[in-house]
Image (cartoon, rainbow, N blue to C red):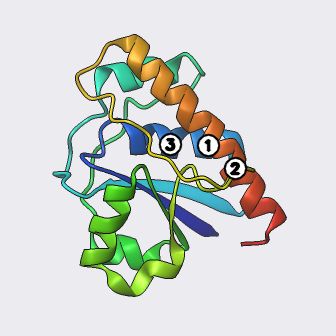
Amino acid sequence: MKTVLFVCTGNTCRSPMAEAIFNHRIGSDAEWKASSAGIYARSGSPASTHAMEATNELGIDLSKHQSQPLTFERVNAADMIVTMTAAHRTDLLQEFPSVGNKVFLIKSFGTSKVPADISDPFGGSLYIYQQTRDEIDRALADLILFIRTENY
């Protein structure tokens, strides 16, 4: 089983949504599984209410999510690390410079190959979270296609 680690700031919004949507989209029989962590996360916080509501609309339950900080063990255990922003990628590589070959921006897998950030919805309305969820979902379609066709 290969692991993709999704990374954001606090591990309560974007990366838990990415983890849950990825696991839902890839299916239970796939050779990949997702996890998530936050660069500045503390352990044990739930997913934000709007993140849970937004994923529930897709039939995905985030109610059991508990945030976890980015650690050496999590970084080393991952086969691929996907960050929500270029700043997350920079912070991660400053802390863990040896893993640069497996760190990607979430939007770097599409046909345009133009990396872009997923904006932080924290503090925003449910509508903002829904937009973020949909943006993540579109990027994940490209990521899943990449890992399936590139034999990553």
Q: Could you say whether the residue bearing mark 3 is in a helix, strand or loop?
A: helix
In this orientation, does residue 29 appear?
no
Q: Quadrant of the C terminus?
A: bottom right
The image position of residue 124, as x and y in percent, is 28, 19
Q: Quadrant of the N terminus?
A: bottom right
Vertical relation: 21 (above or below) 106: above
Left or right side of 62 for 142: right
The residue shown at (64%, 36%) is 138
> Viewer-proximal residue, 5 or 86?
86
Counting other residues with Cα less than 10 Å from the Cα at mark 1, is it few (<14), some (14-19), or many (20 or more)? some
> Viewer-proximal residue, 34 or 127?
127
Among the two numbered marks 2 and 1 on one chain, the one whose residue lies closer to the N terminus: 2
Amino acid under disc 2: Gly
**Residue matched to label 3:** 18
**Residue matched to label 2:** 110
Q: How many marks?
A: 3
The image position of residue 31, as x and y in percent, is 71, 63
**Residue matched to label 1:** 139
Q: Quadrant of residue 151?
A: bottom right
The image position of residue 148, as x and y in percent, is 79, 61
Left or right side of 68 for 31: right
Among the two numbered marks 2 and 3 on one chain, the one whose residue lies closer to the N terminus: 3
> Viewer-proximal residue, 55 or 151?
151
Left or right side of 4 for 13: left
Counting other residues with Cα less than 10 Å from the Cα at mark 2, is it few (<14), some (14-19), or many (20 or more)? some
The residue shown at (59%, 57%) is 33
Mark 2–mark 1 CB contact (< 8 Å): yes
Can you tell which of label 2 and label 3 is closer to the viewer? 2
Distance from disc 2 to disc 3, alpha carbons, whole Å, reads: 16 Å
